């Protein structure tokens, strides 16, 4: 079956047994043949330095920007570290936010989620993630915040095993796909208001 929708998955955790990476892998497995989710690691993204940005950006940054450009939408999972999103993710989003006014995230459908062993599920990091995505004018998917509390009891064999959390998350991914389809339709009918 031809893949018609490509979603890029970004995990804000570099940990080998990361719950966020496990959740992204769970989504990837649950998508139909026409929709594919591909994970892109943030492992090699250097700390943001404006002196290194521009035409000669680091290769890992160019690769990440190209991966976002090639994607129809992005699914981002962030741990909550000290009540904020992970530094790894914020750093990557800072690279992706440039060039100013020409971010590859601008206008691109994006869905975020957080998970945590705490009952709060990383909700503070989620809010911060939204703030940054608003700053770059990403097309944030309208959906209740996906926060998964007590996550360590919900991951089994590297997959999100909790049915309720999985359904809530997958319904959110469904909303992401709907938004991608809507954006594609707008473009094909010539009413892409971004071009005005
Ligand atoms: C430096 C650090 C700070 C943390 N701060 C918080 C926090 O503020 N709130 C929270 O819910 N969990 C916090 N945690 C726990 C993380 O939510 C937990 O390690 C989570 O599993 C990380 O995501 P991962 O499994 O994808 O790596 C913290 C963990 C670390 C290592």
Image: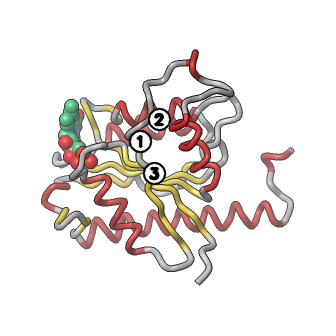
Badge 3 or badge 2: first in the primary sequence: 3
| Residue 121 visible within the image | no
Give how far across and how far down residue 181 sits, in percent. 65, 67
**CA–CA distance in space, label 3 to label 1:** 7 Å
Depth check: give the residue in front, 53 or 154: 53
Tag 2–tag 1 contact (CB < 8 Å)? yes
Quarter of the image where one finds residue 190: bottom right
User: Residue at point 35% right, 35% down?
Assistant: 85
User: Residue at point 64% right, 42% down?
Assistant: 104
Task: Classify the position of the N terminus by image quarter.
Answer: bottom right
Numbered label attached to residue 42: 1
Q: Is residue 73 above or below residue 136?
A: below
Badge 2 or badge 1: first in the primary sequence: 1
Q: Is residue 7 above or below residue 118?
A: below
Circle 3 — which element? Answer: loop
Q: Nearer the viewer, mark 3 or mark 2?
A: 3
- 116 displayed left or right of 5: left
Give how far across and how far down residue 31 sits, in percent. 45, 74
**CA–CA distance in space, label 2 to label 1:** 7 Å
Which residue does the numbered mark 2 point to in the structure image? 92
User: Residue at point 70% right, 35% down?
Assistant: 102
**CA–CA distance in space, label 3 to label 2:** 11 Å
């Amino acid at each position: 079956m031809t893949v018609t929708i490509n979603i890029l998955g970004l995990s804000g955790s570099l940990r080998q047994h990361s719950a966020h990476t496990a959740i992204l892998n769970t989504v990837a497995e649950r998508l139909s043949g026409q929709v594919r989710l591909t994970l892109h690691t943030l492992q090699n993204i250097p700390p943001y330095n404006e002196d290194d940005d521009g035409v000669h950006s680091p290769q890992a940054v160019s690769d990440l920007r190209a991966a976002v450009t090639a994607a129809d939408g992005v699914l981002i999972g962030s741990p909550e570290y000290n009540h904020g999103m992970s530094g790894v993710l914020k750093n990557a989003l800072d690279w992706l936010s440039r060039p100013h006014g020409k971010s590859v995230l601008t206008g691109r459908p994006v869905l975020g989620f957080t998970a945590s062993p705490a009952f709060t599920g990383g909700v503070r990091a989620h809010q911060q993630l939204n703030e940054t995505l608003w700053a770059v004018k990403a097309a944030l998917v309208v959906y209740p915040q996906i926060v998964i509390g007590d996550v360590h009891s919900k991951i089994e064999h590297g997959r999100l095993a909790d049915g309720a959390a999985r359904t809530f998350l997958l319904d959110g991914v469904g909303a992401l796909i709907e938004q991608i389809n809507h954006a594609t339709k707008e473009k094909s009918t010539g009413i892409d208001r971004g071009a005005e």
